[in-house]
Image: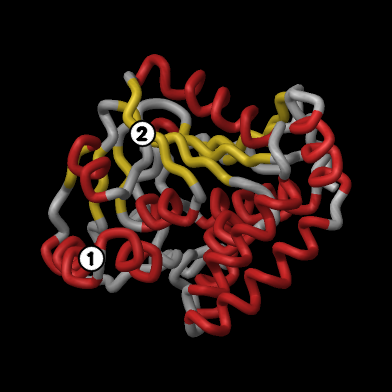
Amino acid sequence: MSETVLFETEGAVGIITLNRPDALNAMSGELLDALVARGEEAAANENIRCLLVTGAGRAFCSGGDLKGIGSGDALDPLASSSQLRRFEEISKLLAEMPKPTVAAVRGAAAGAGFSLALAADIRLAGTSARFVTAFGRVGLTGDFGGSWQLERIVGVAKAKELYLLGSQIDAATALRLGIVNRIVPDNALLDEAMALAQKLAAGPTNAYARMKRNFAYGATHSFSETLTFEAGNMIAASQTEDFRNAAAAFLERRQPEFKGR
C-alpha cells in the first residue's frame, strides 16, 4: 500500500494520516487511491469503532495536486468524471460509515481538502487551521461533496459566498460559523482528537450508526417521513444489547459498558 496514506489503530480507533507533508498533503491520484482503500478498510473492520483522519506535517490537505492534474496518468484525479467519482467515495465513507468519524485539522484545509474535512462527523481545528474552497481561483467548481455539506452547515448564502469569492477563514471564524466543533492549540490537537475518538469508540456505536442514518435520511425527506424513520431506528436500538446493558447500569447507578451490538 502506498506510503502517501498511513493507517494504524490505537485500541478501537482507526487513524488515517495523509502523508505528503512536503506537498502539504495535496491529493495526487496515488494518495486518493490509497485513501479510498484505507477508508473502505476502516469501514469494514468491526474492531474499529471510530475513525480519525488527519494530515502529516503543517497542513491537513491543500486540495488537489495541480502538478499531477491533466497528466494523462491513469490515476489523474480529473481524468474523467467516473474516475473522480471513485475517488470521491472517501467523502461518502466518512459521512455514512456506521461509526463516528473525526477530522483533526492543522494548517491548510483547501479545496478538496476542505471538502474532506467537512465529510467527517466532528471536526477539531488547531489554532493554525485555515479553510478555503479555492476552486474558483483555478477555474474549477468543487468536488468531494463540499458544496452539499457546507450549505447545510452555514446556510446557502454563506456557502455560496465562500465558494464564489474563495475567501480564506481562520479557525475562530470557522468555529463561529459552525464549520468546526472545537479549537485547540496545535501542539495538543492530536491528543485532543484521540481523546475524543476514544470516547466515541467506547460509546454505543450501534446507536451512533443509526443516528447518522437519521441525519442522512432527514436531509432529503420530509419531517413526517423522518419521524417514521426515526421511530423505526429508535425501536431497533431499544432491542440491542447495548440498550439493555445501559438500562441496567442506570438502575444500578454505574457507568454502562457498550459493545456496539
- The tag on residue 159 is 1
**Element on which disc 2 rests:** strand
59, 211: nearer the viewer: 211
- Residue positioned 35% across, 52% down in the render: 114
**Residue at (85% x, 38% y) in the render:** 245
Between 87 and 12, the one nearer to me in the picture: 12
Tell me if 83 is positioned left or right of 47 in this view.
left
Q: Residue at x 68, y 47 (%)?
A: 38
Front residue of 216/114: it is: 216
Mark 2 and mark 1 in contact (Cβ < 8 Å)?
no
Distance of label 1 from label 2 (alpha carbons): 20 Å
Disc assigned to residue 182: 2
Q: How many residues crowd around disc 2 within 10 Å: few (fewer than 14), some, or many (20 or more)?
A: many
Front of the two marks 1 and 2: 2
Residue 133 at x, y percent in the picture: 26, 58
Left or right: 174 as drawn, with respect to 41 = left
The percent coordinates of residue 54 (x first, y second) are: 49, 36
Q: In which quadrant of the rendered view does residue 209 lie?
A: bottom right
> Label 1 crowding class (10 Å Cα cut-off): few <14, some 14-19, many 20+?
some
- Residue at 59% in and 66% down: 214
Examine the rendered structure and indicate whether residue 122 appears above or below residue 64. Answer: above
User: How many discs mark residues in the rendered view?
Assistant: 2
Residue type at mark 1 is Ala
Amino acid at circle 2? Arg
Q: Residue 199 in the image: state x and y as whole percent.
A: 62, 29
Secondary structure at numbered mark 1: helix
For the view shown, which residue lies furthest in the top direction? Answer: 187
